[in-house]
Image (cartoon, helix red, strand yellow):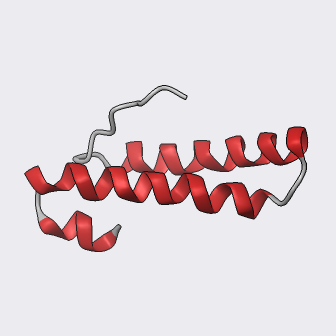
Amino acid sequence: MSIVPINLNSKASIRDKARLNICIAKDLADSFGGRKADYLIRLNRKLRMKIAIGSEYYTSCIAIAA
């Protein structure tokens, strides 16, 4: 999976990435079995880490929200 930069100034891009994670989790669950929630937990954890790491250049509010 390639790393896609996230524009932390845009709430819409983070929201879009979260929606994309839902679709990816559903596809993984359909392809490999298991629950969608199990895949979604891991994908969202990665998203939260990207938000927290990238937010050190912006306000700390985003990191707290992550």
Residue extending farthest to the top is 2
> Vertical placement of 45 versus 8: above or below?
below
Residue extending farthest to the bottom is 64
Look at 72% across and 48% down and name the residue there.
25
| Picture mark count | 0
Which quarter of the rendering shows the C terminus? bottom left
Left or right: residue 66 compared with residue 60: right
- Residue 9 x/y as whole percent: 22, 47
> Vertical placement of 23 versus 64: above or below?
above
Look at 65% across and 57% down and name the residue there.
40
- Residue 32 x/y as whole percent: 87, 42
Left or right: residue 50 compared with residue 21: left
> Vertical placement of 65 versus 55: above or below?
below
Left or right: residue 7 compared with residue 36: left
Look at 72% across and 62% down and name the residue there.
38
Look at 42% across and 30% down and name the residue there.
3
> Vertical placement of 44 versus 19: above or below?
below
Q: Choose top left, top right, bottom left or bottom right for residue 30.
A: top right
- Residue 12 x/y as whole percent: 39, 47
Q: Choose top left, top right, bottom left or bottom right for residue 1.
A: top right
Left or right: residue 19 compared with residue 31: left
